[in-house]
Amino acid sequence: MYQVFGVKTMLAWFTTLCGAIVIIRVWLLGYQFDGSMADGWRLISSSIAIGTLLVVLIGQTKLFSYLCRAPLIKSFFPPIDGIWVAELSSNWNKIQELQGKLAEDSAKPLMAHVTIKSTLFFVRMNLTSADRYSRSKTIHVTVSRDAQDSSVQLNYMYINETDVPLSTDSPTHNGAARLNVHDDGLCIWMDGTYWTDRKWSEGLNTAGRIALRRPDAPSSRE
């Protein structure tokens, strides 16, 4: 999630945090600084260690997901950690139409369960289709903020695995997606597009729309 602001900004914040720790230790906690270079280095290095520990404890543990729910913080780091329900629709029915093989249920959306693990330094996503036919896991995720409207996007690549694939499917394939994160003040949801390289040599690679909502949220948005 740090990518929302970028490495330079996060380093600037970390430097500010360490500086604040130095000030607190010297002026409020009575650190006895003798003025020597060696003691100065001990003060600075130990303050950096304390700052690093704080970042790890807050940013890399469950505390980060709770922190993201705070009204001020979630405007910077949206609280996407947890369980989601996904609805996927693809162009598979169009592909089948071209082949003259349109199935009755080919146009129905695919439902899936998604688990997102979000910390300050990484985001991971795992998806399992509701019928247990296939599962996916991300291999690379980035988070970005639009410079124009400050909206947040998730951009990721994933690998999909299918234990017993249909003749038109493959045991594994790669895919990518771009999700926009929405927050209307009452709930957060995500939607966007995805595409795959599934059986691309046979012209069976797919693309479509994906929408994520919390299990207790409405199934559709206006």
Image (cartoon, rainbow, N blue to C red):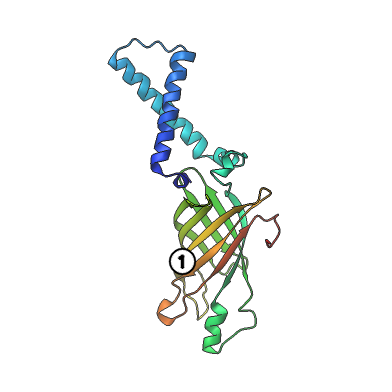
Mark 1 highlights which residue? 175
Q: Quadrant of the C terminus?
A: bottom right
| Residue 59 in picture, x, y percent from top left | 50, 38
Q: Residue furthest bottom?
A: 100
For the point 40% across and 10% down, the residue is 32
Residue 145 in sight: no
| Residue 14 in picture, x, y percent from top left | 42, 33
Secondary structure found at label 1:
strand
| Residue 204 in picture, x, y percent from top left | 47, 79
Write down the quadrant of residue 66 in the picture.
top right
For the point 55% across and 60% down, the residue is 127
Q: Is residue 167 left or right of residue 222?
A: left
Labels in figure, total: 1
Q: Residue furthest left?
A: 37
Q: Is residue 124 left or right of residue 32?
A: right
| Residue 133 in picture, x, y percent from top left | 57, 70
| Three-letter amino acid code of the residue under disc 1 | Gly
Q: Is residue 10 above or below residue 124?
A: above
For the point 47% across and 19% down, the residue is 24
Task: Give 138 or 75, whichever is nearer the viewer.
Answer: 75
Task: Give 169 or 151, whichever is nearer the viewer.
Answer: 151
For the point 52% across and 87% down, the residue is 98
